[in-house]
Image (cartoon, rainbow, N blue to C red):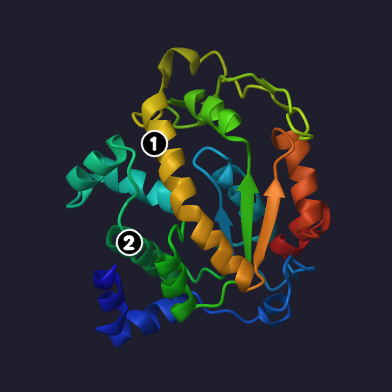
């Protein structure tokens, strides 16, 4: 972690670059809230973070909000997978880390994120929704040194549901689209509601081309969940203390969860789509 701190302290140009990439104009009202008030989508520069265990659906909901609000969705998991497939200098190291179910180091994540922000700056992107970062308190502190996060959304599902979801994930090797073959019906316990999620099945053309991610095996998924839970509690508490954490228990699949998430964020899908397109 000291190496990450040196990355920012030793280069004023690197810090100023990331400050420019992550500039904000509309965070003042949110700073004093423990949940999200109405965000003006016309500004199109919300700076949000999505937290949640592997497989909870951070990418799904972050990408939908990204399209709705007109801001980029930056997923560190995608950045890692792109680096893995690129045969770049980090590829071999990342392959070993991912196959063992371990978390990628701060140094590597900061490196990949910085490259992605540089690309965004070149395209004049405004605002962002971060997915998969920060994962440690030190990462959260580093992020706070260079920008002002408006809101942190923590998506939650029971661990047995997460395991089923991860083991049901499939990718079409030809078109690259994601599917899920798991049909989840979990009875709620201790007063919690039942959770049902229909499978997201591929079209017939994709069926023979489906593949499973190398890290979507039961031992690796369980290890990833264990490590995440161990690391995430301090991060959640960090943002809770700063009054920026919104905890959201997913009630089911996308049809059940999406409208309720919009309600929790005080967003209107039709109105905000029009504003983002303006």
Q: Residue at x 72, y 78 (%)?
A: 32
Q: Quadrant of the N terminus?
A: bottom left
Q: How far apart are the alpha carbons under marks 2 and 1?
A: 19 Å
Q: Is residue 173 visible?
A: no
What residue did someone put label 1 on?
A: 223
Check disc 1 and report its element: helix, strand or loop: helix
Q: Nearer the viewer, residue 155 or 258?
A: 155
Element type at mark 2 = helix
Location of the C terminus by quadrant is: bottom right
* Left or right: 275 as drawn, with respect to 85: right
Q: Furthest-bottom residue in view?
A: 12
Count of labels shown? 2
The percent position of residue 208, horizontal first and vertical second, equals 44, 12
Residue 121 percent coordinates (x, y): 43, 71
Q: Is residue 233 above or below residue 47?
A: above
Residue 275 visible in the displayed image: yes
Comes first in the chain, label 2 or label 1: 2
- Is the residue 20 above or below the residue 61 in the image? below
Q: Is residue 27 left or right of residue 106?
A: right
Residue under the image location 81 percent in, 60 percent down: 266
Quarter-of-image position of residue 258: top right
| Image position of 227 with respect to 183: above or below | below
Labelled disc at residue 106: 2
272 lies left or right of 46:
right
> Is residue 222 found left or right of 93 in the rendered image?
right
């Amino acid at each position: 972690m000291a190496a990450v701190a040196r990355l920012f302290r030793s280069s004023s140009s690197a810090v100023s670059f990331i400050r420019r990439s992550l500039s904000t104009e509309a965070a003042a009202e949110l700073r004093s809230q423990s949940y999200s008030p109405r965000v003006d989508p016309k500004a199109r520069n919300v700076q949000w973070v999505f937290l949640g265990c592997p497989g909870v659906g951070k990418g799904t909901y972050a990408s939908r909000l990204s399209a709705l609000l007109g801001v980029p969705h930056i997923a560190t998991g995608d950045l890692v997978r792109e680096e893995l497939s690129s045969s770049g200098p980090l590829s071999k190291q990342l392959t070993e880390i991912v196959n063992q179910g371990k978390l990628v180091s701060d140094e590597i994540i900061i490196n990949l994120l910085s490259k992605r922000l540089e690309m965004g700056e070149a395209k004049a992107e405004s605002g962002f929704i971060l997915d998969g970062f920060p994962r440690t308190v030190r990462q959260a502190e580093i992020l706070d040194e260079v920008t002002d996060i408006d809101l942190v959304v923590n998506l939650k599902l029971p661990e047995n549901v997460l395991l089923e979801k991860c083991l049901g994930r499939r990718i079409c090797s030809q078109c690259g689209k994601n599917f899920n073959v798991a049909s989840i019906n979990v009875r709620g316990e201790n007063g919690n509601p039942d959770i049902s999620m229909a499978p997201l099945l591929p079209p017939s053309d994709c069926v023979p081309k489906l593949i499973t991610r190398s890290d979507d095996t039961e031992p690796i998924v369980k290890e990833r969940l264990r490590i995440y839970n161990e690391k995430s509690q301090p991060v959640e508490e960090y943002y809770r203390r700063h009054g920026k954490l919104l905890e959201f228990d997913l009630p089911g699949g996308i049809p059940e969860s999406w409208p309720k998430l919009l309600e929790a964020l005080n967003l209107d899908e039709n109105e905000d789509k029009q504003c983002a397109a303006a």
